[in-house]
Image: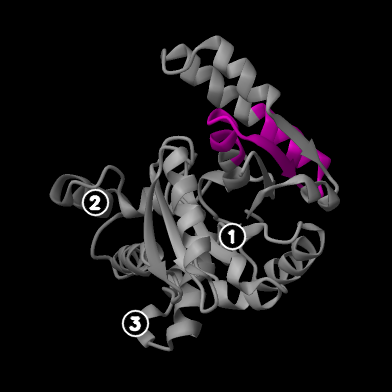
Amino acid sequence: MIKTVGVVGAGTMGSGIAQVFAQNGFSVILQDVAPAALDRARATIEKSLAKFVEKGKLAAADRDATVARLSTSVDLGALGQADFIVEAATEQVELKLKLFAQIDGVARPGVIIGSNTSSISITALAAATKRPSLVLGMHFMNPVPLMTLVELIKGQATSAETMATATDLCQKLGKTPVEAADYPGFIANRILMPMINEAIFAVMEGVGTPEAVDTVMKLGMNHPMGPLTLADFIGLDVCLAIMEVLHNGLGDPKYRACPLLRRMVAAGYLGRKSGRGFYTY
């Protein structure tokens, strides 16, 4: 029976995942090595819940109960109390491999570990543990409290029972789980990132301005947000990292990152979080 969920990493995704679990009745232990990140996450969650209350989507009493179910810790050992763990640390292979070995060391036997990675091999992460059959990908979409999709990625050793447990858990969160195989980028980023990359090539080659490209995709393809606005929202450094994973993992030149994307990341133009990307914020 899953009652307590551990979330590792208190960034944008981690705090969103923690909020969704807490809102749906689970006790949550949000862990991060940086106390400042935990403080920020708590403030973000409280702000998000306040918005739900304002819009009449959440009762004030439910907001208070959600906040009460959330605890934070800088100690990875706190995850020993968790019945299910989701890792949402920075998208770096070495960091995640090290973290999975550590989480495996503190988690109780039989506890499933899911990774919110958007492109890194689940099979490789599972191999860093002594419980590969209990490791899977759980790729939530940003912003987590609003987006209903969760990509569930089955690694080489992931058991059918692990997938079934995660599927059931997603449904309890009001999310729609979709299964993907463990190939670079899974489904979402395998399709999305080359589109964003191609939009950047169109800008670099002078085919159209960022505004023109985004307007065509919004009005012509009915996308709620243009690919360059979306790239700025995701972070251009994250887009570049995912293109590298696709290119390295699949070896196909069609996945090579646009030189303009590389140049912008080198200049520190990372999008919304740095105040400047294809647009100024």
Left or right of 252, for residue 206: left
> Residue at 81% of width from left, 58% of height from top?
106
Which residue is denoted by mark 1 in the rendering?
115
Which residue is denoted by mark 3 in the rendering?
254
Sequence-wise first label, 2 or 1: 1
Instruction: Mark 3: give few (<14), some (14-19) or many (20+) Cα within 10 Å.
Output: few
- Helix, strand, or loop for circle 2? helix
Q: For residue 253: magenta?
A: no
In the image, which residues are magenta? 18-43
Residue at the far left in the pictured view? 220
Disc 1 marks a residue whose amino acid type is: Ser
Sequence-wise first label, 2 or 3: 2
Disc 2 marks a residue whose amino acid type is: Ala
Q: Which of 205 and 11 is in front in this view?
A: 11
Q: Nearer the viewer, residue 280 or 137?
A: 137
Q: In which quarter of the image is residue 257?
A: bottom left
Which residue is denoted by mark 2 in the rendering?
212
